[in-house]
Image (cartoon, grey):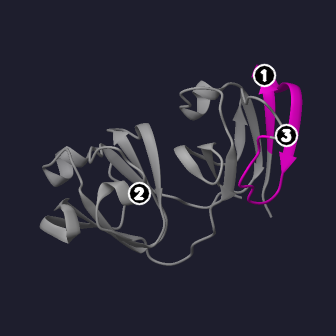
Amino acid sequence: MGKITFYEDRNFQGRSYECSSDCQDLSSYFRRCNSIKVGNGDWILYEQPNYRGHQYYLHRGEYPDFQQWMGYNDSIRSCQMSPQYQGTFRVRVYEREDFKGHMMEYSADCSNVFDSFGFHEIYSADVQGGYWMFYEEPNYRGHQYYLRPGEYRRYTDWGASSPRVGSFRRVHYYY
């Protein structure tokens, strides 16, 4: 069972709300979110209700201000736990939409897509095992996109506004 506590102010001050399950709209519990404590589980946070907008992946730990989770502002409006996964991680990435063009298969993290794949952009992906987080910049920086097992025929399917992917990694469950 997961546990996450949201605080309106930095350094765990101000009004707070504790959550232990997915919540599609946090708006009624707090106006802004400037710090977070994750007691248990892996969480995906979203800037908008209904699991939309910029995404942030957090695991157990303390985040005294929104910059600690690479947030762009103090808006968190929905959250969900990432399920535990115990199988083999595998993702295929493609240089074109609809799984066309050059393809590479990965079962491990990739800190620099261009160095590994030879391209700055990924237009489609097929997540065949595990949960993955795509990042807009190398070394796990920039906008984040959470991918569940399934087919993503174009980058907009995972919520991105451009095909730029600089790095990606497996989402492991932390206790």
Which residue lies under the disc numbered 2? 158
84 within the magenta span? no
Q: Where are the magenta residues, as a range?
A: 5-27
Spot occupied by residue 60 in the image (x, y as percentages of width and height): 70, 47
**Tag 3's secondary structure?**
loop
Of marks 1 and 3, the one in the foreground: 3
Determine which of the numbered discs, if any, sits on residue 11 in the image. Answer: 1
Q: Is residue 62 above or below residue 51?
A: above
Q: Is residue 157 left or right of residue 115?
A: right
Q: Is residue 141 left or right of residue 46?
A: left
- Sequence-earlier tag: 1 or 3: 1
Which residue lies under the disc numbered 3? 29
Disc 2 crowd rating (10 Å Cα; few below 14, some 14-19, many 20+) is some
Q: Is residue 101 left or right of residue 42?
A: left
- Sequence-earlier tag: 2 or 3: 3
Under mark 1, the amino acid is Asn
